[in-house]
């Protein structure tokens, strides 16, 4: 955020410094979740690898209109309440809720976003976000009064509420009082462009985008509803966030949350994050740490008064292989689409050895699928076609006709080429490259050669969409603890840029303008089920759709899973309490640690102000 831009529109502070929560605050039941009433004060230090990573506080700070609780049930959060009647959603705001600068938070902030951002071509060239479109039509929005917002579609929209609870908040409201001052609808085109010129940006829209900063958190002047308000301008190596004195949560004793006064983020190189955490330079640390770091982190616990909690990562597979069914190479397309080939690749992997090597034997072996923590889980989803059986793998390869071998024992394809599988991956994912080394040894035993091709992630995405990849190695299913009301998008070409069928995904995402239409019936069934799910407000049927889609994956092995169940180190100072010793960790739906409510953490004993003293 440039100083010139933000200095034009400074933050408006409250008239006094007294806490000003809403008249109808959210009062969490801490005791019901085994947590203690806390006291306000202190600073929590954490580390980030680059300045832009401050945005992750808006993820795990997890302030949402509606959000998941620790049991993954949707609850009103910023909203006082919401009602759903078919395709009609009515939101009620909290009486007296204010932005961090003290200005009232009202339905006008939703109207401004809808009319002046989402439907403003210069700010939103593609129009409103996809989760608001039903059968290609946007909702009708009404604003009956300052506290009421109504969205109406012609039929149910089950995508809506889960999108609001997502790790990245879609922010369907904006601080209208702050952003109107650069919008031509309110100040005129000439004045808006003059302000952009004064701020040294190319247009009023660019200035508006720069000031509109509730996700990136690099503009201290932008009012927010989140628990902590940014106070540092970039560039910097230390970023400070202060408690939002208008925050909407209050404990049962009347103490406004968050308890912690300040969060300080220090920038450190990626290679030093573990060492600095080990040296006690962070009070809370998880992002940037991984399972191989656990021994080093444990070594520093006693000397630096912290604990290393181990949270299971809720991911379908730590390493998954994606045969590209839409690759442009006709011989490889035919092989990847042959279910016998995919089953052979899966059967040839010794997952027990991978588990012992990568996850210290603590993981769960099998398909890339949901975890047993999900109410939708069935054991067969994990095990079907995923047991180690190299003899069966060889039999399947022979049955396809891949019987001829070259002098080194590698099977030959129908066109005479050696069966050399080029597996592309993100070059920064070291654990994936380690896994591929082992998988290459397993496949060599059944006459297949694996060649790794690590590269930059953006380039990998381009090659995938262009149909140039044969197989990609990446992490597996992200939403691995779903409930019926969560969208099953990852299981079909409805997900953008899916490595197993990227050109089908492109076709779906572009509404037929790009890629190619799906021509495999079993995958088309996944698309049909996804479309049916999107038309329902019946959790029972939605759950059945999830289970059919997951069993479709298990039978067809569209994605080859290996082992799940890595542990995420969550390092916490011993006196920082009210965070669980063990909980599920994921991007979606837990928003890293977000659903565990960081705003409820507090210092046990005298407030810790070490970060202020440095």
Image (cartoon, rainbow, N blue to C red):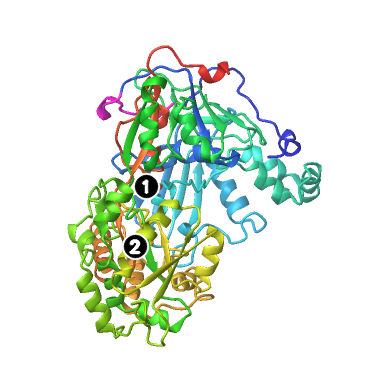
Q: How crowded is mark 1: few (under 14 residues within 10 Å), some or many (20 or more)?
A: many
Range drawn in magenta = 23-35
Q: Which residue lies furthest to the front in this view?
A: 407
Specify whether residue 514 is painted magenta.
no
Q: Which residue corresponds to mark 2?
A: 439
Q: Which residue corresponds to mark 1?
A: 589
Residue in view at x 34 percent, y 20 percent: 37
Q: Nearer the viewer, mark 2 or mark 1?
A: 2
Q: Please tell me the numbered disc located at residue 401.
A: none
Helix, strand or loop: magenta stretch: loop
Query: Where is the C terminus found, in terms of image quarters?
Result: top right
Whether residue 12 is visible? yes
Residue in view at x 62 percent, y 60 percent: 125
Of 602 and 104, the residue lying toward us: 602
How far across and how far down the image is residue 372, in percent? 22, 50
Q: Residue furthest top?
A: 606
Query: What kind of element bears circle 1?
Result: loop
Q: How far apart are marks 2 and 1 (CA)?
A: 30 Å
């Amino acid at each position: 955020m440039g100083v010139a831009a933000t200095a034009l529109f400074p933050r408006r502070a409250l008239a006094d410094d007294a806490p000003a929560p809403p008249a109808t605050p959210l009062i969490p039941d801490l005791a019901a979740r085994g947590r203690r009433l806390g006291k306000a004060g202190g600073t929590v230090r954490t580390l980030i690898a680059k300045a832009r990573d401050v945005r992750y506080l808006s993820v795990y700070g997890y302030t949402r209109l509606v959000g998941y609780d620790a049991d993954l049930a949707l609850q009103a959060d910023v909203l006082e309440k919401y009602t759903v009647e078919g395709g009609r959603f009515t939101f009620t705001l909290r009486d007296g809720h204010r932005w961090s600068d003290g200005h009232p938070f009202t339905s006008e902030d939703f109207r401004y976003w809808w009319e002046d951002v989402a439907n403003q071509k210069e700010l939103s060239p593609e129009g409103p976000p996809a989760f608001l479109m039903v059968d290609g039509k946007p909702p009708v929005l009404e604003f009956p009064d300052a506290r009421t917002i109504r969205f109406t579609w012609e039929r149910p929209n089950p995508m809506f509420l889960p999108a609001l609870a997502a790790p990245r908040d879609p922010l369907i409201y904006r601080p209208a009082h702050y952003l109107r001052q650069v919008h031509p609808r309110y100040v005129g085109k000439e004045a808006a462009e003059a302000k952009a010129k004064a701020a040294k940006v190319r247009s009023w829209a660019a200035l508006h985008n720069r000031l509109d900063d509730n996700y990136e958190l690099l503009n201290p002047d932008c009012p927010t509803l989140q628990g902590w308000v940014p106070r540092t301008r970039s560039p910097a190596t230390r970023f400070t966030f202060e408690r939002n004195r208008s925050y909407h949560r209050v404990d049962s004793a009347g103490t406004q949350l968050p308890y912690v006064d300040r969060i300080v983020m220090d920038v450190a190189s990626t290679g030093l994050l573990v060492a600095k955490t080990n040296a006690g330079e962070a009070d809370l640390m998880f992002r940037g740490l991984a399972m191989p770091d656990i021994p080093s982190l444990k070594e520093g616990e006693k000397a630096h008064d912290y604990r290393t909690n181990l949270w299971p990562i809720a991911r379908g597979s730590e390493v998954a292989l994606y045969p590209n069914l839409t690759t442009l190479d006709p011989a490889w397309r035919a092989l990847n689409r042959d279910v016998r080939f995919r089953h052979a690749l899966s059967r040839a992997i010794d997952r027990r050895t991978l588990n012992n090597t990568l996850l210290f034997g603590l993981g769960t072996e099998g398909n890339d699928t949901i975890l047993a923590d999900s109410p939708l889980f069935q054991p067969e989803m994990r095990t079907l076609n995923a047991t180690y059986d190299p003899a069966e793998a060889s039999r399947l390869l022979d049955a396809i006709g891949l019987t001829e071998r070259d002098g080194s024992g590698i099977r030959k394809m129908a066109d005479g080429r050696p069966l050399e599988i080029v597996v592309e991956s993100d070059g920064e994912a070291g654990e994936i490259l380690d896994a591929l080394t082992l998988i290459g040894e397993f496949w060599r035993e059944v006459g297949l050669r694996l060649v790794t091709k690590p590269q930059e992630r953006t380039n990998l995405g381009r090659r995938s969409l262009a149909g140039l990849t044969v197989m990609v190695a990446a992490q597996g299913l992200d939403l691995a603890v779903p409930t019926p009301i969560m969208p099953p998008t990852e299981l079909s070409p409805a997900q953008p840029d899916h490595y197993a069928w990227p050109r089908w995904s492109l076709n779906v995402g572009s509404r037929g303008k790009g890629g190619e239409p799906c021509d495999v019936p079993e995958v088309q069934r996944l698309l049909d089920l996804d479309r049916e799910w999107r038309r329902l407000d019946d959790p029972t049927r939605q759950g059945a759709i999830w289970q059919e889609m997951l069993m479709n994956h298990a039978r067809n092995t569209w994605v080859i899973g290996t082992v799940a169940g890595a542990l995420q180190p969550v390092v916490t100072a011993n006196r920082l309490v009210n965070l669980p010793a063990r909980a599920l960790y994921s991007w979606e739906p837990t928003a890293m640690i977000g659903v565990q409510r960081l705003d409820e953490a507090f210092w046990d004993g005298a407030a810790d102000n070490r970060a202020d003293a440095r």
